[in-house]
Image (spheres, grey):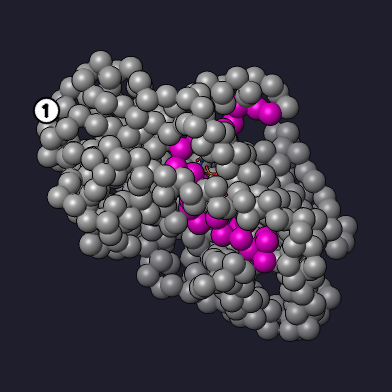
């Protein structure tokens, strides 16, 4: 019989995983400690913006007309333990306050809450991004605390989904990595992932520490690629070169590749920044800090981008923000998401505000989250309203909506036709033809 699945934690990762498992044909029970979230999800609604996720939930959440009824939600660990054969742990692992290390308290509390109820054979599968060594510790804890003893087993199965593409990445993963301690666990995971495996997703079977490291090293590589191209942008600016052309040209080399070479104000979000910091902290504990020294540089190049954007804007408005109006297009850390965690765009907006500029922000989906995080900034209901009277317009998150703006129409609304493209994503020629001074990071002035 097909295993019954539970998903513990229903954030970006968990909500998507639960819906995807139902789509693959399994009976699924999702758990969250937030009753509010459970009520929302049970009504087929998603507490964040993620393209396609609400549709997928609507197809499967029990009680919704025409749904498969395969997906339900609860707040009870007891119910989860009774129901499931395979339990995916998808809770978040944020950065600790004031430290680089990762906060494991949600993972630990999920295991402590689940284990005492595991009375029959079960596979607990960690998906959260954790410091290497956590799985071995959690496996020991499981064996100790679960009444089923050795029949309650652990596996580690990192997740590589990107926000904005969560549904696609989960249903059609470019690889499935499992850290297992037994053939039984591997067999069960092959069964769970039978469909993507049949469609050709590579399946990498390994031990616990390697599985944990695959995730942190993949994110470190991606962060390094972005900071590399941003370092080249700094050099291009100094030498009057063009980083966009440079990225295109080096990207033709297949060993380098074109992806993740977009220079701009750098990476943010709930993953890359905190993951590289937690990785450095963990390497330090293991006595291997020297191996990851370069990540310190990756992080500092990245943070420097935000300051540089502020500098360029200050220079553009005449050397001081006092008495100036700055329009900020974009608040989320990337397009097609409403996530503003560690958003470079909001960081830049906040710095300009602190330096006395009057900042007005507009974002297609991130307004509520931005307002909650930065209540003192100004907000406008559209790009056109945001730029009204502006001395400079900053393009900081590359939403499609912004590429489709009419520079002539916006030009009528601003005080000065100055645009600074923090994502190298607008068509410079089109803006310049409409009379704008267009400036981008790592590119010649005009
Ligand atoms: C990332 C990883 O891609 C994913 O595999 C992992 O599971 C979670 O972390 P995500 O945080 O959703 O996913 O966003 P991603 O698309 O990787 O972008 C991260 C940041 O890098 C964004 O702020 C984006 O704007 C920035 N970025 C990305 C660049 O500045 N330049 C690029 O070329 C690519």
Q: Which residues are magenta?
A: 256-281
**Residue in view at x 61 percent, y 39 percent:** 228
Q: Vertical placement of 118 versus 221: above or below? A: below
- Residue 391 placement (x, y as % from top left): 18, 39
Q: Which quadrant: the N terminus?
A: bottom right
Determine whether, in the image, residue 262 is placed left or right of residue 351.
right
Is residue 196 in the magenta section? Answer: no
Determine whether, in the image, residue 376 is placed left or right of residue 185.
left
Task: Identify the image quadrant of residue 116.
Answer: bottom right
Q: Residue furthest right?
A: 183
| Circle 1 SS class | helix
Q: Nearer the viewer, residue 11 or 339?
A: 339
Is residue 279 in the magenta section? Answer: yes
**Residue in view at x 76 percent, y 59 percent:** 290
Task: Report whether residue 379 is seen.
Answer: no
Task: Identify the image quadrant of residue 327.
Answer: top left
- Residue 43 placement (x, y as % from top left): 37, 59
Q: Nearer the viewer, residue 386 or 435?
A: 435
- Residue 55 placement (x, y as % from top left): 42, 44
Task: Report whether residue 225 is seen.
Answer: yes
- Residue 6 placement (x, y as % from top left): 61, 64
Magenta span dominant secondary structure: loop
Q: How many marks?
A: 1
Determine whether, in the image, residue 234 is placed left or right of residue 410.
right
**Residue in view at x 62 percent, y 69 percent:** 101
**Residue in view at x 57 percent, y 42 percent:** 227
Q: Which quadrant: the C terminus?
A: top left
Residue labelled with disc 1: 412
Q: Nearer the viewer, residue 376 or 185?
A: 376
Q: How many other residues sit within 10 Å of disc 1, few (<14), some (14-19) or many (≥20)?
A: some
Q: Nearer the viewer, residue 322 or 123?
A: 322
């Amino acid at each position: 019989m097909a295993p019954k699945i539970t998903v513990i934690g229903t954030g970006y990762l968990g909500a998507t995983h639960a819906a995807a498992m139902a789509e693959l044909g399994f009976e699924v029970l999702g758990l969250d400690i937030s009753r509010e979230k459970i009520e929302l999800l049970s009504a087929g609604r998603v507490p964040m913006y993620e393209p396609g996720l609400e549709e997928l939930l609507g197809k499967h959440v029990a009680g919704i007309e025409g749904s498969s009824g395969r997906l339900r939600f609860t707040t009870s660990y007891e119910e989860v333990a009774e129901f499931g054969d395979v339990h995916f742990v998808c809770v978040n692992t944020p950065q600790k306050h004031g430290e680089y290390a990762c906060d494991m308290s949600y993972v630990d509390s999920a295991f402590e809450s689940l284990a005492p109820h595991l009375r029959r054979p079960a596979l607990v599968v960690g998906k959260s991004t954790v410091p290497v060594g956590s799985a071995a510790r959690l496996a020991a804890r499981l064996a100790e605390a679960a009444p089923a003893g050795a029949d309650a087993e652990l596996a580690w199965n990192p997740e590589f989904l990107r926000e904005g593409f969560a549904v696609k990445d989960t249903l059609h993963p470019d690889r499935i990595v499992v850290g297992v301690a037994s053939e039984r666990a591997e067999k069960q995971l092959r069964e769970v992932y039978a469909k993507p495996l049949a469609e050709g997703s590579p399946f990498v079977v390994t031990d616990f520490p390697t599985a944990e490291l695959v995730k942190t090293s993949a994110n470190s590589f991606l962060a390094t690629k972005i900071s590399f191209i941003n370092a080249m942008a700094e050099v291009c600016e100094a030498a009057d070169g063009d980083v966009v052309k440079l990225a295109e040209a080096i990207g033709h080399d297949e060993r380098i590749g074109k992806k993740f070479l977009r220079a701009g104000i750098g990476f943010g979000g709930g993953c890359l920044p905190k993951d590289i910091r937690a990785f450095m902290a963990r390497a330090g504990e293991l006595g291997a800090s020297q191996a990851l020294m370069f990540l310190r540089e990756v992080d500092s190049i990245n943070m420097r981008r935000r300051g540089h954007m502020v500098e360029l804007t200050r220079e553009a408005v005449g050397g001081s923000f006092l008495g100036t109006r700055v329009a900020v297009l974009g608040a989320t850390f990337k397009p097609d998401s409403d996530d503003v965690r560690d958003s470079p765009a909001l960081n830049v907006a906040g710095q300009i505000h602190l330096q006395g500029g009057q900042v007005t922000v507009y974002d297609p989906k991130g307004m509520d989250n931005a307002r909650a995080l930065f209540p003192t900034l100004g907000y406008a209901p559209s790009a056109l309203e945001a730029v009204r009277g502006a001395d400079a317009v900053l393009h900081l998150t590359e939403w499609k909506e912004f590429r489709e703006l009419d520079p002539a129409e916006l030009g009528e609304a601003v005080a000065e036709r100055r645009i600074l493209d923090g994502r190298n994503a607008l068509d410079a020629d089109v803006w310049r033809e409409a009379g704008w001074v267009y400036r981008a990071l790592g590119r010649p002035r005009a």
